[in-house]
Amino acid sequence: MLRLVADENFHRAIVRGLKRREADLDVVRVQDVGLLMADDPSILAWAASQGRILLTHDLATVPDFAYERVRDALSMPGVFAANTRLPVAQVIEDILLLATDSEPEEWEGVVLYLPL
């Protein structure tokens, strides 16, 4: 199962829904690990050090920083980027499918835009 980290502005209802639907899912929020107000490169570096895929709604800057890490040959376990206009239930379903039916190495260096 994938290990996930939700960035600061990721919709709380999605994180709660993920935990409610899959109690064993390993998902933390940046606020809970001392990264409140951290910049995107710092969050991506922490996610890489922990082997966690970043969940974000930040389609404007996070993908660029993620690909910068890839370009610089730094670890980037993956980013799942969801538009804020998507229904919460759909984002939960997509993330659960990815988290339970794929392996971490499939997402190394990948920015995946939701919906699937």
Image (spheres, grey):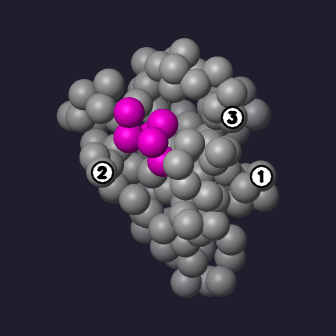
- The 10 Å Cα crowd at callout 1, few under 14, some 14 to 19, many 20 or more, is few
Report the residue marked by disc 1. 50
- On the image, the x and y values in percent for residue 72 come to 62, 83
- Asked whether residue 79 is in view, the answer is yes
- Give the residue type that dot 2 points to: Leu
Residue 40's spot in the image, x, y percent? Answer: 56, 53
* Residue 36 at x, y percent in the picture: 65, 33
Disc 3 to disc 2, how far (Cα)? 21 Å
**Quarter of the image where one finds residue 32:** top right
Q: Which residues are magenta?
A: 93-98
Point out the tag, 1 or 3, that comes first from the N-terminus: 3
For the point 63% across and 59% down, the residue is: 104
Amino acid at dot 3 = Asp
Residue under numbered circle 3: 26
- The local secondary structure at tag 1 comes to helix
Helix, strand or loop under label 2: loop
**Front residue of 36 and 108:** 108
Look at 54% across and 64% down and name the residue there.
Answer: 107
Residue type, label 1:
Gln
Quickly name the residue at label 2.
Answer: 116
Q: CA distance from mark 2 to mark 1?
A: 25 Å
| 95 drawn magenta | yes
Magenta-drawn stretch contains 40? no
Closer to us: mark 1 or mark 3? Answer: 3
Mark 1–mark 3 distance (CA, rounded to whole Å) = 12 Å
As displayed, is residue 57 above or below residue 64?
above
On the question of residue 58 being in view, the answer is: no
Up-down relation of residue 56 to residue 13 (above or below): below
Secondary structure that dominates the magenta span: helix
Q: Earlier in the sequence, mark 3 or mark 2?
A: 3
